[in-house]
Image: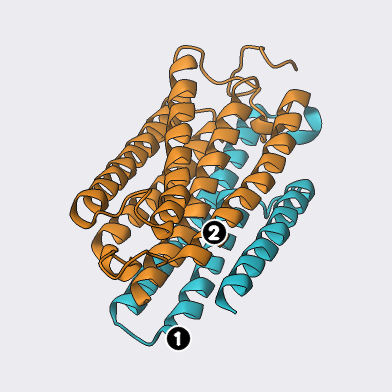
Chain colours: A orange, B cyan
Amino acid sequence: MHAEEKMTLEKWPASPEKQTLEAKNKFLGFWLFLGGETVLFASLFATYLALKDKVPGPDHALAKDLFEIPLAFLMTMLLLTSSITSVYAMYHMKNFEFKKMQLWLGITVALGLAFLGCEIYEFYHYVHHYGHTFTSSAFGSAFYTLVGFHGAHVVFGLAWIITLMVRNAKRGLSLYNAPKFYVASLYWHFIDVVWVFIFSVVYLMGMVG
Amino acid sequence: MENNQTNTGNATVDIAYRRKKNAEEMRHQVITFTLMIFLTIVAFVAVGAGMSGWFTVPFILLLAAVQVAFQLYYFMHMSHKGHEAPALFLYSGLLVGLITILAFVTIVWW
């Protein structure tokens, strides 16, 4: 069975994401990349923890002045929900239901965009109401680097998923593109993994003081 | 390819069986998701209630660790077979990462 073969429900294997050699290599390489991403984000978290609330003067806003529960909660719910919708998309992929997979990936993208909108509003709010910018303090630099890096991952993940959806819209599922969808969904889950630590370490611990 | 198929020789039976298995797994995923939402709400409530930081900080970090384990093992399928290499990569990354955090935090706080 080769990757470009026209697929039918009867021929569709149980693990379509790992049938070809290319798919297996993609899977392994991608997890190696995620191991590297873990180190990247850990060093950004370390920097943030070291520089939290390090501001040049008493008139600068601290973490507990900036963060608010409702917005952080809304953003967390949006991203968490987008994780289960992408699980649902992969469930349809395994069942060889291309249209439903595209639909649930579309919902995932919509939730991701909503998250991004909240984040843009949040940064705008911090800059204009608190003067909390990238260059205003070491705290600001560390905060925007960590949260901004995560936001950049969301942007990249959305671009990736949208590109896959558009490129394969008329092709349908094959053993060539199934691993591509699978790896993109892994990336999306990893973004959520990082966010779990961001909302806990940055927002919740920031509000505790 | 054959070794990965559930082969009864009857394609319709195989498809029905696999769909049932997939649906069952999806149900477990939804349960995991419900638990994750619940843990998130508990963490936010713990902070919103304004309890002492000595309790809240370790508590929300514990909830975060549980939630990440759910993500990795269920949503990202690390509980499935054939994930030895991913586990090695991820835990190696985590080890280096945790040492980095420990080093930075001890330098600054002590």
Query: Which image quadrant is residue A99 in?
Result: top left
On the image, the x and y values in percent for residue A108 come to 39, 38
State the residue position of label 2. A47
State the residue position of label 1. B55
Would you say residue B6 is visible in this rendering? no
**Mark 1 or mark 2, whichever is nearer to me:** 2
Q: What is the three-letter code of the residue carrying label 2?
A: Thr
Give the alpha-carbon distance from disc 1 to disc 2, as whole Å.
24 Å
Viewer-side residue, B15 vs A29: A29
Above or below, comparing residue B31 to residue B18 in the picture: below
**SS category of the residue bearing label 1:** helix
Q: Name the residue furthest front.
A: A57
Q: What is the three-letter code of the residue carrying label 1?
A: Phe
What residue is drawn where x is 42% and y is 35%?
A155
Indicate left or right for B27 with A38 as reference: left
What residue is drawn where x is 81% and y is 33%?
B3
Query: Which image quadrant is residue B52 in?
Result: bottom left
Above or below, comparing residue A44 to residue A176 in the picture: below
On the image, the x and y values in percent for residue A72 come to 31, 59
**SS category of the residue bearing label 2:** helix
Above or below, comparing residue A107 to residue A174 in the picture: below
Bin the neighbour count of mark 2 within 10 Å (Cα to Cα): few under 14, some 14-19, many 20 and up: many
Viewer-side residue, A8 vs A87: A87
Indicate left or right for A207 with A198 as reference: left
On the image, the x and y values in percent for residue B40 come to 40, 66
